[in-house]
Amino acid sequence: MKIESSDNPGWAISIDIAETELADLEIPYHLTEYAPNDWYGIKVENQVFEAFGDPMKLEFLLKEFRRIAEGHTADSARVLT
């Protein structure tokens, strides 16, 4: 797991999901932007969960990973597409 601050400003999270039950999961990048300072994006590609968000979204992004991991089904992946 890697958590970094980004210069836009905000957070970037990367979690390797290879060799887990989530390894086959693919979610295309989806950006949700409510305002210039209220946004997040999530994708799962090449066995890596990646999430990005504004400075207030760190806890939210980690909870989104948990929600996706706990509810891993074809239907849960479609929610973000």
Image (tube, rainbow, N blue to C red):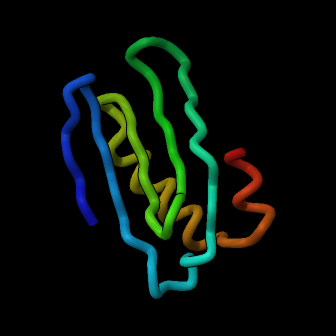
Q: Is residue 59 above or below residue 5?
A: below
Point 63% across, 55% down: residue: 27
Residue 20: percent from left, percent from top = 49, 85
Q: Is residue 13 above or below residue 55?
A: below
Residue 14 falls left or right of residue 79: left
Q: Is residue 29 above or below residue 40?
A: below
Q: Give the quarter of the figure containing the C terminus.
A: top right
Point 55% across, 18% down: residue: 34
Residue 57 falls left or right of residue 39: left
Residue 40: percent from left, percent from top = 47, 34
Which quarter of the figure has residue 21? Answer: bottom right
Residue furthest to the front: 46
User: What is the total number of numbered labels drawn onto the structure image?
Assistant: 0
Residue 3 falls left or right of residue 71: left
Q: Give the quarter of the figure containing the N terminus.
A: bottom left
Residue furthest to the top: 36
Q: Is residue 57 above or below residue 3?
A: above
Which quarter of the figure has residue 48? Answer: bottom left
Residue 35: percent from left, percent from top = 49, 13
Q: Foreground residue, 33 or 43?
A: 43
Which quarter of the figure has residue 30? Answer: top right
Point 53% across, 50% down: residue: 43
